[in-house]
Amino acid sequence: MPADGERVARWTHYGLLRFHDRSTSAPPGVLPEPPELRARTSTPISGERMSSTTNGTDAPRRILVVVPAHNEEECIVQTLKEIQAAVPEANVVVVDDGSQDGTADLARNVGVDVLALSFNLGVGGAMRAAYKYAQASGFDAVVQVDADGQHDPYEIPTLLATLGQGPERDSSRADVVIGARFAGKGDYDVRGPRRWTMRTLAALLSRMARTELTDTTSGFRASNQHAIALYARHYPAEYLGDTIEAIVIALRSGFRVSQVPVSMRPRQGGRPSHRPFSAGMYMFRAVFALGLARVRRWPDYAGLDREHHQGVEP
Amino acid sequence: MSDRLSAAVVSVLVLVFIIELLRRRQLKEKYAILWLFVGIALLVLLLLPGLLTNLSAALGFELPVNFLFMVTLMLLLGVSMHLSWELSRAEEETRSLAEDVAILRLQVEQELIRRRPPSSEKVNRTSEG
């Protein structure tokens, strides 16, 4: 039996492993980070790491780059190596979404942490797991990057430059920053009714966000710690929910969402995870996702967090 | 007339109930869509009496209400089958999770034992001795 004062492991209701001293009675939700777990993560974050990913006046941020992957063994290694080269000060984690191939092992061999899900949950499910992990580990920012190489890792600092400490009231920064494909940079080949749906969606969401959003289905996005806390609990798992609904959830919870133009590259290998939908089906699902997100009840996270966040003026 | 109206009112109430559950995130979209479809189909048939009688006559039913029962039964059958399928999937996933948790628990216990400092039994013995 472990003695009093010795560190014991407990399972929280999430199934997250937390260590705490039995002698101390820490308030719930405020548990000390165990030194053992820290040593296991890929790179420790220290105060000396000043880089382009800080936002000037603030302390350096702990950044987590999340790469959700399902059977992406063809391109995962290249993607991870590019990320490590582009943002060496960031932690990287691959969310292995029930892959049957060597995706997870390839990622571990490159020195990247892997969150191995027990079965396939989809991008939304994988991302919520990642956000929970980011919240539990205390990261300040999460950047989602696709495993297929379509997102250019060298654009990550571009996203992070607009990401504020939040909750954001200043219009130059946002709590969630989307890397937009058709905002002038690059060319993305979408035609016909599908393109019309995307443009209508973008117009509607731009009105809600009170800023221009042209690419609402892009998965290349950065979130600050407040958005992480929100997404750790509420992240939709349905098709198009993980992109469109996620934006609406953030907006309705009081956060700022904005975009920056980035250039995309074609898929570097493997096959896309989404089944190709007809334009009509796509439109229906988009409308349904948007409509649902608008009428659902979302807690006011920005408001809640403002009360609990020490040192931040409401 | 009044029986159709009351049935329509019940349909509307059911629809409102489903939508409210959706709003509170207590119902997943894939289930809600089926129920919404059932509710709307029923409402359409009830509010357009001509549609019901014509359709049932064209399909060879003696009474329109038979057609209504048939439609309702088929929809309920569909929902039940879908639930059975989803439940089977969920059970398989739960099994997977139980297995993973058991393996993780054992690995954690083994690691904790490995890391535990030399036991305090030595300290106790010296204080007693």
Image (cartoon, rainbow, N blue to C red):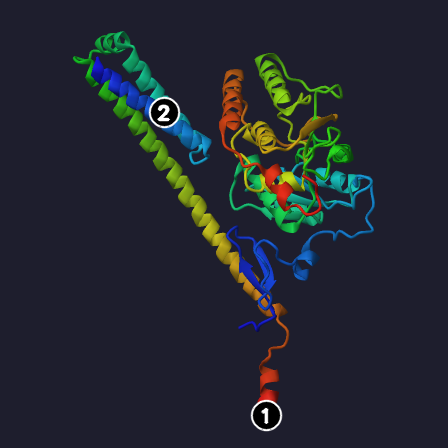
Rendered image quadrant of residue A306:
top right
Q: Give whichever of A85, A7 is nearer the camera.
A: A7
- Asked whether residue A285 is in view, the answer is yes
Protein chain holding label 2: B
Residue at (53% x, 18% y) in the render: A283
Horizontal side of A208 relative to A287 (left or right) equals right
Q: What residue did someone put label 1 on?
A: B129
Quadrant for residue A206, please give it. top right
Instruction: Report x, y in % for residue A66.
Output: 66, 41
Disc 1 residue crowd, few under 14, some 14–19, many 20+, Cα 10 Å: few
User: In the visual, does A214 lie left or right of A277?
Assistant: right
Q: What amino acid is labelled 2 in the image?
A: Leu
Q: Is residue A179 visible?
A: no
Residue at x 39%, y 37% (from the top left corner)? B86
Query: Is residue A27 or residue B40 the one in the foreground?
Result: A27
Residue under label 2, please give it. Answer: B15
Q: Nearer the viewer, residue A237 or A83?
A: A237
Classify A203 as above or below A175: above
Where residue B99 sits in the image (x, y, percent)? 47, 53
Give the residue type at disc 1: Gly
Q: In the picture provided, is A199 more to the left or to the right than B13? A: right
**Viewport quadrant of the N terminus of chain B:** top left
Residue furthest left in the image = B62
- Name the subunit of mark 1: B
